Image (cartoon, grey):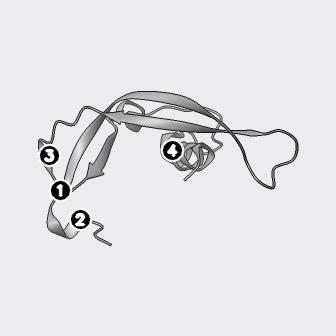
């Protein structure tokens, strides 16, 4: 998943009007969690990492970046079995 995918996904849910010219609603204040080992962990920090390796096939000397979501690792919320995505 890329940041652009996340932006598109969230913009659909946070549009305040049908034209999409105004953003913000109740979802804008939602807490972000990540599922790990059947538990939800709250995102506490975000970091942008720059990778010094060039991307093969990219035009020019393009470097990749990563958006890293850091969790608090409080495993207080257990996800019910029927909601898990076990692969």
In terms of image quadrants, where is residue 32?
top left
Q: Residue tagged by mark 1? A: 79
- The front one of 31 and 26 is 31
Q: CA distance from mark 1 to mark 2?
A: 7 Å
Residue 38 image position (x, y, % from top left)? 19, 57
Tell me the residue that label 2 is attached to.
Answer: 83
The residue to which callout 4 is attached is: 10
Residue at the disc numbered 3 = 77
Tell me which numbered mark, 3 or 4, is placed earlier along the sequence: 4
Instruction: Note whether residue 16 is visible.
Output: no
Decide which of tag 3 and tag 2 comes sooner along the chain: 3
Tags 3 and 4 in contact by the CB under 8 Å rule? no
Mark 3 or 4, which is nearer the eye?
A: 3
Task: Indicate which label's residue lies in the foreground, 1 or 4.
Answer: 1
Residue at point 36%, 30% (across, down): 29
SS class of the residue under badge 2? Answer: helix
Q: Quote the CA–CA distance across marks 3 and 4.
A: 23 Å
Q: x, y percentage for residue 72?
A: 25, 32
Q: Secondary structure at mark 1?
A: loop
């Amino acid at each position: 998943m890329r940041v652009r995918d996340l932006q598109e996904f969230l913009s659909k849910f946070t549009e305040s009007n049908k034209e999409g010219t105004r953003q913000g609603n109740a979802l804008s204040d939602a807490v972000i969690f990540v599922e790990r080992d059947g538990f939800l962990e709250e995102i506490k920090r975000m970091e942008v990492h720059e990778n010094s390796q060039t991307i093969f096939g990219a035009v020019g000397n393009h470097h990749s970046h990563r958006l890293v979501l850091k969790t608090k690792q409080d495993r207080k919320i257990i996800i019910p079995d029927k909601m898990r995505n076990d692969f």
